[in-house]
Amino acid sequence: MATTPATEPYIDPRVTALLVIDMQKGFCHPESRMERSGVGTANQRAIIPDLLRLVGLAREIELPVFWSQQIHFPEDVTRRRRRIPSHQAKQRWTPCLRGTWEVDFADEVVPSMRPEDYVIEKHRASVLFETTLDTKLRMLGIDTLLISGCNTDFCVETTIRDAYYRDLDIVVVRDCVAGPRPSFHEDTLAKVETYFGAVVGLAELPSLIVPGVRGGDARPLVDEVRDELAEAAR
């Protein structure tokens, strides 16, 4: 699937934030319940190098960085009350249970996190459902989200839909989102391009950043990151 074409830079760092969705051990670790269930975590782990490059680019152009953290409650009675089985009941396992190591962020991403970043704890698929994310985005004047993380077809897509309904602009970095089912992943990206926003490649992203903002010209910085990405791709 082709990425969304662009004719000029449209990502303004002054009003843009990076959202990293659920890069946790429960979705990425080879010994997680998700892996042991047979669903798999290899696709999620595979995006980590590119995701870290994306975080580095966000630092260079001074974007706020948000990390969502999924936490499921073992004693969650709301799911047990459902007459129609929840997705967890259907799959017969629950990732990222409160009090387990699965809720922790993946070891590979922890060094890239900073004290000034925002960690958004969530208990449902969308990062915007009954969390503080919407309020924080409004306080920071954010109207555009760069989307990364996992899993593409569930938590990522649900968050994208919620963000779109809140009139936020959505840019999904296709190299930096993943899920265990490739066909579902591609279906979500197709829906984003059709309805909800833009899908761009990581190597393309620097050229879409509006230069000359954040108190100085960002172009030398994005050129440097572009060169680094090109070198890494060789």
Image (cartoon, grey):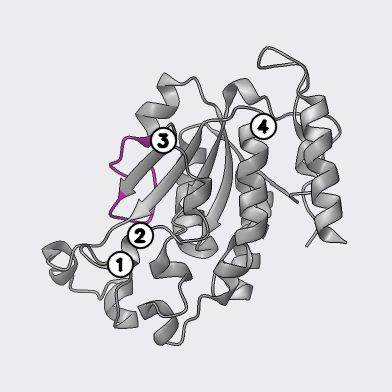
Q: Amino acid at mark 1?
A: Trp
Marks 1 and 3, the one that precedes in the sequence: 1
Q: Residues within 10 Å of mark 2 (few under 14, many from 20)?
A: some
Which residue occupies 45% across, 53% down? 158
The question of residue 45 being in magenta is answered with: no
Q: Residue 70: which quarter of the image?
A: bottom left
Q: Position of residue 114 (x, y in %)?
A: 46, 38
Q: Does residue 82 sit above or below 70 in this rendering?
A: below
Q: Position of residue 102 (x, y in %)?
A: 33, 67
- Between the residue at mark 3 and the residue at mark 4, the CA separation in whole angstroms equals 16 Å
- Label 4: state its secondary structure: helix
Marks 2 and 3, the one that precedes in the sequence: 2
Q: Which residue is mark 4?
A: 60
Q: Amino acid at mark 3?
A: Pro
Q: Residues within 10 Å of mark 1 (few under 14, many from 20)?
A: some
Which residue occupies 50% across, 50% down? 111
Marks 4 and 2, the one that precedes in the sequence: 4
Which residue occupies 52% across, 39% down? 164
- Between the residue at mark 4 and the residue at mark 2, the CA separation in whole angstroms equals 26 Å
- Label 2: state its secondary structure: loop
> Mark number for residue 115?
3
